[in-house]
Structure formats: C-alpha cells, structure tokens
Image (cartoon, helix red, strand yellow):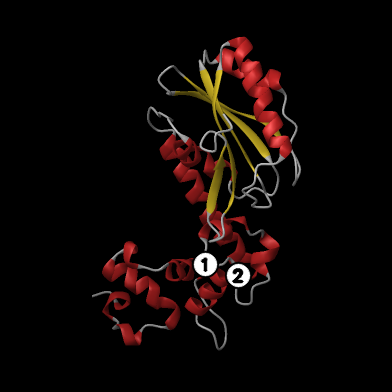
Amino acid sequence: MDEYFSLTLKEWADEDKPREKMLSKGKKELTNAELIAILLRSGLQGKTVVEVAKEVLTRSSNSLTALSQMDFKQLSTIKGVGEAKATTLMAALELGWRMQSEISNSKELIISNSKDLFSYITPLLVDLDHEEFWAIYLSNRNKVLGRQRISMGGQTNVSVDMRIIFRGAIECKAVSLMVAHNHPSGSLIASREDKNLTHGIMEAGKILDIKLLEHIVIGINSLGKADYFSFHDNGLI
C-alpha cells in the first residue's frame, strides 16, 4: 500500500489532517476552515494550518461572501497567509463564483421574482469594490434573452444611460427587463438617486412598451452574507 494512505490519523501532521479527512469521508464532511486549510497547505510555528484558516474566517466574520470581498493586501497581511497563499485563496473563491455563473447560464433560465434575479446576478456583483449597473432582458414568459453591463462607477455611485439600457432591450426583442446594481459599502438601503433612477427607467419603458419588472440593490446583511433590497417587493415598482 502507498505509504501516504497507510498512515493513521494520529501519525498525520496537523496540516495534513484535513486532506486525510477528505480522502476518508469526502469533501462534504469538511468545515469551511478545513477546506481553507487545504488551500493554505501549511501553518506556521506554533500554529496549525487549521488555526490559520480559522483566523482567516474570523477576519471575514465567518462569511465566505465577505472573504471573497477581501483584497490581496487584506489577505496577505494575515499572519500565516502571505502573498502566495493569498493569491491561492482569491483564485479559489473567484472560481467558485464563476462556476455558479456558468451553471446559471448553462440552461434556459426563467427569472420570475427578486430571489431568482438575486441568484442569477450575484456572482457578477457581490465582491466588487466599485458600483456596476446591469440590465437583464426577458421574454413574455420571463425567459432570459440577454444581459448587459450598462455602466461602471466608483465606490458610491454609477452613471446610467437610459439609451443603452433600452437599446439592448430592443436588440434582444425583450418585452420586459430587470435591473440590478451593487453597493460596495454593503448598504441595503436604496438611496434617493436609486429611487429616481428606477422611476426614470419605468417611465422610459412605458414609452417603448418595455416594462421594468424589478430592480434590486445587492449588499451585505448583518450576518456578513450577500443580500438584496427589492424595489418590487417593497412596493416601489
């Protein structure tokens, strides 16, 4: 038998125990800290890799969403992480978001409500350090016909051109649309500018007979998880 597999759990080094657990019990049995420990590969003197992984989670309030929002500098300054491990963590988290987006786009997709829209658009917006505004174009039965990033802004605002929004809708032959943007600050409160913009899109849509069904603002809730504010659900559309 391969020596790697013949070791007992007690004989494994601390940094190898999460890998041994994955091999014997499967990946679903590992905690978030143990999965991160596998990515980090090793700890430091006086601190196991699992302990370092727990520190990483503590810095992000035990939220993977918040962890994905941490930048290179924030991660690399955690004792026991450093530059190489920080880039490994960032790459793994980005692959997770891209996989979620790929799954969403691999089949005919129907978006009927704010929850559907949140699941669909979150991978594109949740960990950005700037605002982006997206439009999603729909058929008469809410099938996604296309999506378009309308604009990118700074950390506190984004400029939106109505002509770009509705040009995309006309090109897709859409009968309705939904829009979404993020608040890098994490705030889930719709600003006065957000409300004015929503009203403007609604009015422009009436002229073209293209109805605005939903507008969501994506931020972070008190538990450190991605969440959203819905204009429709709150009676503003």
Q: How many marks?
A: 2
At mark 1, the secondary structure is loop
Circle 1: is it few (<14), some (14-19), or many (20+) Cα within 10 Å? some
At mark 2, the secondary structure is helix
Q: Position of residue 157 (x, y in %)?
A: 75, 40
| Residue that label 1 marks | 62
Report the amino acid beneath label 2.
Arg
Residue extending farthest top = 208
Q: Residue at x 65, y 42 (%)?
A: 190
Q: Residue at x 52, y 67 (%)?
A: 62
Residue extending farthest left = 1
Front residue of 156 and 130: 156
- Vertical side of 202 occupied by 127: above or below: below
Circle 2: is it few (<14), some (14-19), or many (20+) Cα within 10 Å? some
| Residue that label 2 marks | 59
Quarter of the N terminus within the rendering: bottom left
Quarter of the C terminus within the rendering: top right
- Vertical side of 147 occupied by 34: above or below: below
68 relative position to 197: left or right = left
- Give residue 68's quadrant in the image: bottom right
